[in-house]
Amino acid sequence: MQTNHTKTSVLPSGGGAMLLDPADTLVLLLDHQSGLFQTVRDIEVADLRRNVEVIARLCTLLDIPVITTASEPAGTNGPLMPEIAEYAPHAVHVARKGEVNAWDNDDFVEAVRSRGRKTLVMAGVWTGVCVMFPALDARAAGYQVYAVMDASGDPSEMASRVSLARFVQGGVQPTTTNALLSELHRTWARPEAPELARLYGLVAPNYAAVAESYRRAQQAALDAGQ
Amino acid sequence: MQTNHTKTSVLPSGGGAMLLDPADTLVLLLDHQSGLFQTVRDIEVADLRRNVEVIARLCTLLDIPVITTASEPAGTNGPLMPEIAEYAPHAVHVARKGEVNAWDNDDFVEAVRSRGRKTLVMAGVWTGVCVMFPALDARAAGYQVYAVMDASGDPSEMASRVSLARFVQGGVQPTTTNALLSELHRTWARPEAPELARLYGLVAPNYAAVAESYRRAQQAALDAGQ
Amino acid sequence: MQTNHTKTSVLPSGGGAMLLDPADTLVLLLDHQSGLFQTVRDIEVADLRRNVEVIARLCTLLDIPVITTASEPAGTNGPLMPEIAEYAPHAVHVARKGEVNAWDNDDFVEAVRSRGRKTLVMAGVWTGVCVMFPALDARAAGYQVYAVMDASGDPSEMASRVSLARFVQGGVQPTTTNALLSELHRTWARPEAPELARLYGLVAPNYAAVAESYRRAQQAALDAGQ
Amino acid sequence: MQTNHTKTSVLPSGGGAMLLDPADTLVLLLDHQSGLFQTVRDIEVADLRRNVEVIARLCTLLDIPVITTASEPAGTNGPLMPEIAEYAPHAVHVARKGEVNAWDNDDFVEAVRSRGRKTLVMAGVWTGVCVMFPALDARAAGYQVYAVMDASGDPSEMASRVSLARFVQGGVQPTTTNALLSELHRTWARPEAPELARLYGLVAPNYAAVAESYRRAQQAALDAGQ
Amino acid sequence: MQTNHTKTSVLPSGGGAMLLDPADTLVLLLDHQSGLFQTVRDIEVADLRRNVEVIARLCTLLDIPVITTASEPAGTNGPLMPEIAEYAPHAVHVARKGEVNAWDNDDFVEAVRSRGRKTLVMAGVWTGVCVMFPALDARAAGYQVYAVMDASGDPSEMASRVSLARFVQGGVQPTTTNALLSELHRTWARPEAPELARLYGLVAPNYAAVAESYRRAQQAALDAGQ
Amino acid sequence: MQTNHTKTSVLPSGGGAMLLDPADTLVLLLDHQSGLFQTVRDIEVADLRRNVEVIARLCTLLDIPVITTASEPAGTNGPLMPEIAEYAPHAVHVARKGEVNAWDNDDFVEAVRSRGRKTLVMAGVWTGVCVMFPALDARAAGYQVYAVMDASGDPSEMASRVSLARFVQGGVQPTTTNALLSELHRTWARPEAPELARLYGLVAPNYAAVAESYRRAQQAALDAGQ
Amino acid sequence: MQTNHTKTSVLPSGGGAMLLDPADTLVLLLDHQSGLFQTVRDIEVADLRRNVEVIARLCTLLDIPVITTASEPAGTNGPLMPEIAEYAPHAVHVARKGEVNAWDNDDFVEAVRSRGRKTLVMAGVWTGVCVMFPALDARAAGYQVYAVMDASGDPSEMASRVSLARFVQGGVQPTTTNALLSELHRTWARPEAPELARLYGLVAPNYAAVAESYRRAQQAALDAGQ
Amino acid sequence: MQTNHTKTSVLPSGGGAMLLDPADTLVLLLDHQSGLFQTVRDIEVADLRRNVEVIARLCTLLDIPVITTASEPAGTNGPLMPEIAEYAPHAVHVARKGEVNAWDNDDFVEAVRSRGRKTLVMAGVWTGVCVMFPALDARAAGYQVYAVMDASGDPSEMASRVSLARFVQGGVQPTTTNALLSELHRTWARPEAPELARLYGLVAPNYAAVAESYRRAQQAALDAGQ
């Protein structure tokens, strides 16, 4: 099963032929709910939430549409993490009617179709369920699909490895928050560069410390140079 | 090697085109025996048995046929875990005549064929032997096959990674108990929802604690509201 | 700081001089609550609950008194795990008035004192807080104290190692559910032996499989011998 | 070497005889610098910084004095993490003159002595150096000393285990941010309870999700009850 | 790249269509040398050697031809482990002339070709070099190839994961000693069954203890029955 | 609690003042039974058995007395591992009457006392039970006690850490098979040196490969020198 | 997607049909910068740098062209590690204009094209970004691509597993420094053998110790033989 | 057993009362031999050797005497690592006569005594043997002893934990190379500061990258400021 449509690169170098096209990308955030978070065992909850926050901020910064959905938010699974609405206020929420697989829900699929974008970036909890099922169905419906593994969560390390293998087997491209950020970022020669730099500090906290050291070293050099 | 037949979805959304069809599914539980359990090193025995119990309960709840088999249960390998018969009393047992590979046994293959279902969900100990061999043979015989990694067990972490890779290479879809439960569950808008909720508490024990907290919080709200 | 009073052994061998005396032992189960369980990271919740269940069953079997307490059970911390009341119906519950440290609560300390026993076996969540604080205070009050590490839980592996070190430093004896069971069991030549054997199968699930294999092997020998 | 002075408890129960007395406590934050952070390998930097932030907020909330210091902040070691000054604006900073061991610096020791408190809670990077050296010297000078292991950092797991053992050997009490928070918190029956609850959500991120679920469950109960 | 030729099963059930045919199998043991063993980090040397011993014994038991080779055995890489010659005295040794890749050596390839078997089972140290290179070349030459991961060794866990992925990518089937033993064993209804049972005890040491318990339990039953 | 009697060294250097005196040492091997082995999780069973074998061989080589015992060997716990009797035929076996703690059994304690040796080296399964209880009681009875951690086994990593801490707290010296071998070995200038060298190859399998390389390198040098 | 062009082997054995052809190989070292190093979590920085050093030395030894590039070396990401220029002085550096993906930069792609080689070996930090993007684009442009996983680095273990899977999915061959060294080395019967042996000692430090032992053993044999 | 003599601090602050006095310190490097290195499993050999190199360089830099010794360097254990003589040419070597415990050798003990220093810093392979035995004997002889855990090596993680516990129990202070470096360093206000900074880059390789970033950032600031 082929996973990637070679795109006509807009660059003279031919660069990006195999990379995400932001103008064709729609982000789907699936069931990031406080109750489900307690069962996640392949990533720490603090890291998972920070990665989802990065995606929300990134979509706002680069004007990429976002759809959220939740399974039974008034029930045991708990409410959606509030950071999504806070950092991606343009996200559209689609309520479901009890379906585990978001792709079983007409409203959700219609919300996706109506955007007219053919590349879907998905993340959610659980990876092997709430991301896997719509990812496989979206592949069958002709979409190109990316699954952001570390903005998603599975109930065991073994489940995580199984999800990764099943994505690859099903023609879904696995990725990470860091790679997604870089793949949409593409160049430091753009006005959003400072905000993007801050997002790297969230997704890789040592990067934030690198930046702090950098600024202090420059200050010291300037102080000494006076 | 193609792993998945795209099914004609019965839903307007097209959902489930790539997912398990319960009406076409047969579950095979292979050699879950007390002696073999002692050699398992990629999952704790308590977790393995609880996952098998979940599958047994799930099949009973959703009327999915089950076939069990064991290799030399009067010998060193030990008896089949009794929870299967307890929670899936409808399971049919097929005795083997010493074959390591269940698919080498005529009675077993005939028992499978006679059900007329083309999707086989397999679990067993060892994953790389008792599941792998019939899984590969069933693929060759035209079946669609799922291997439930965490209701199975291998004698080392390395063996587990090898089994996962070999399944994918051979066109067998790896899955987990949690994903299987969700894939057969499909919607909370069904009468079995409460029993299904309890199964999630078994497969992900933190989920049970989430549910306990939920009920207590609601009680507290109602107590306060009086 | 001396941790152990050498007891006058009742056995001719002198055995047990340094072991728990069941007649002088009181078990304290502290804050095993569903909300707090979600934060535990040094033991899986299923294992933790099963160990607490073993202690509850053991105390019932051997007539050892139990006191339970919980911090804010109507609030975020959640309700006490129901298995304690189920398997140790003789346990006495002491409600607290918001104190984090159970030893700060008069009713609790009075409940302990009134039993007249000088050996306290404690378990709870979190190990480094809900067990540590009353354990240290009870040492200061002259009690001999044991902390059951795997019937307790801490929010990280590092926290768990710190708690273990601080217990030893403070003269509290660390132990495990398995050791506690064995230390109170003492001999197979007693009427409760079969029930005790079942508890080993809970605390070490491979032991249950060993027993299943054993019974089946004997059956096979008898079948063959006929 | 005795580590703990038994205090005269102010509670009728005798509770807290062995616990921290907030009125006698001084917090020392040592060399939490961006360059040194890059070498830490026993805790993730994001977790380390969040724990230090919790201590800073806690000291502000409960009016506990804080002293910070840094080794060569204009040099390679990098600037102090800014969260300390942000969340504990009352912290006093003492510059050093190149000493690795803060206790070698007169100004620092004088700053400690002048507070008149005999219980020192220390955290820093590296644990085995910047915390260890002043901790051992402070013990020799008659102070009671706590080392907060997870608000500190060491360059390897092995180094972390060595530091823990050497603290215990030297009569320094190891603790964690979570235990420190709880030990100073002591009771929910105080006006700062809501702020303290938020700190638990920082130190144990799953706790924050528990609280979100709790509030949503209560809302659902009230909605249903209308 | 297709990895498996569907064989015409000799069994009525169709079993074994995808499994190893012992009559078409040749085992290649590549560079199991004492010097190279010191660099292995994805499996303990004792386990690696025991697994190679199992393969040697198995080939002797089932009359499967074996070829060994070594790279510079008089040099730093060290001598071949002596257990191979001890337990598979029928193994043919092919000396190389300095080639890292055994398939670069005419004598070796000729030794393989002359056997007339089309299925090659390979193991060696390092997995990603001494097994990988001839495995890929043998695939290009039309052979069906299996790589026994745990009778081989790589210098890091990461290297091991890379080797596994590259094997799958190159159409080489990964397997383990345990799976190889079972795949050649096929049925307990054969005269070699007792010897095969002992090999399981080597490859999975807990299995040996299961057998010891089994025999003792049967003895106890017979003793009691007298 | 003091752990070590300073001995009068027999060497001019004063060496060995704190080390084991072979002439005063008695080895106790407690409950190394096949059924209990299945529950061990802090060491692989193959390694555990090989370490016990090393101790058995070592005691035979150096004429150190050994006492074995087993708890209910005709029952679920299974038979004693046969390697002990094979490699230490001089070991004396003491049957127990159901006691979990060997020190509760008169015959066992009498067997120990009658040897007249004051240093006891203990190993067994479980570490925290079958070794811990007699170790603590033997300390109370005035013996100097060593616990060989890796010739013993506990049902979890956490249990293993707890046992280590409790041994230290109780004045029992923890050690390993490797250290015991070296501590009794003491000098290469003794006739048993070649046999001792082989034991190092068992306790540290890489050492055996080092020796193989060494011999081959010397052969190569001699071959080249001819 | 096919990954490997079968080459016409120049050896009579047919060996190397699937291996790297040094004469067609170009090495690309991407963004090995001191600031980015701090974020790497799937390999230790010392190991990563040593592996890059090995590749630099290897290319110099075997006359393989190298291109380096860096993203914003005057900014936070930091300078390129100096060992590359030190050990591969023939490496050509291409400055970028802010592009994250080197393949987006005309100068870089032109530098690659002008070499006329069709096999690209890439390494860099981050693996999933700085290696992944040009690797996928180079595949689309018709190159055969290898990614050296352990001369690259990703910010988490999960990211590393995702990168490995995505490489395989995209037709990029994953490899390691050790395998690359061996694949270019090919035979000990060449003049560079002694220098190559030293490189193995860098890539697998235990190998260096093996060589030290070997030389000393030979010396001892010769000394004894005198 | 008291481990530390409180020294009279030479500083007004009282700092260093509990720290190493360089003028009273003697470093003993025990059996760092290439053959023994192959058995080390609690630290990577590259890290172990780099740490020993740091100690050698440090002693040369600060004029601290060093004694080396080796057990049977012409035999299987292999030669001493050459870096010690290279970086600490002032080290005195004492040959042994087959003794495992260096303290059993008169020449060695005399070499120690003749230095007249009462503080011994020891490192070696194996930690639990070659360091432990002389460390315990030196304690008995009245020396203050430090064991550098990560410049030493043990054959398993369990052995490493046991050694750490036994050191603490025996009054030996465990430390690390990093702590030793810092404890002897004491202040940046000394002429050796630049060389010391380089040693931190060896002992914590991320620190070297921090320094590289620092210098580059300062250069960039100066370039921009021109």
Image (cartoon, coloured by chain):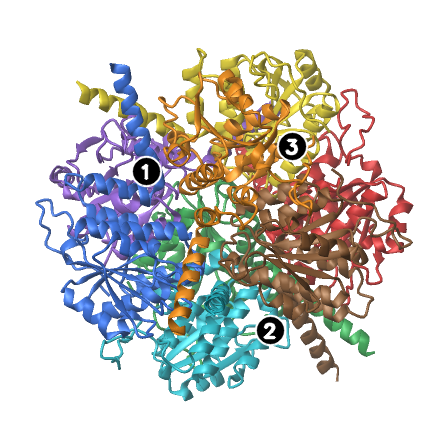
Chain colours: A red, B brown, C cyan, D green, E orange, F blue, G yellow, H purple
- Disc 3 is placed on an element classified as helix
Query: Dot 1 falls on which chain?
Result: F
Q: Are marks 3 and 2 on the same chain?
A: no
Of marks 1 and 2, the one in the foreground: 1
> What residue does disc 1 label?
F207
- Neighbor class of circle 1 (other Cα within 10 Å; few <14, some 14-19, many 20+) is many
| Residue D197, image x, y percentages | 60, 67
Q: Nearer the viewer, residue A44 or A145?
A: A145
Q: Amino acid at mark 2?
A: Pro
Query: Disc count in the image?
Result: 3
Query: Dot 3 falls on which chain?
Result: E
Q: Are marks 3 and 1 in contact (CB under 8 Å)?
A: no
| Residue H116, image x, y percentages | 14, 41
- Neighbor class of circle 3 (other Cα within 10 Å; few <14, some 14-19, many 20+) is many
Q: Quadrant of residue G91?
A: top right
Distance from disc 3 to disc 1, alpha carbons, whole Å, reads: 36 Å
Q: Amino acid at mark 3?
A: Gln
| Residue F192, image x, y percentages | 17, 42
Query: Dot 2 falls on which chain?
Result: D
Q: Quadrant of residue G79?
A: top right
Q: Amino acid at mark 1?
A: Tyr
Q: Is residue G91 left or right of residue D130?
A: right
Q: Are marks 1 and 2 in contact (CB under 8 Å)?
A: no
**Which label number is shown at residue E169?**
3
**Which label number is shown at residue H35?**
none
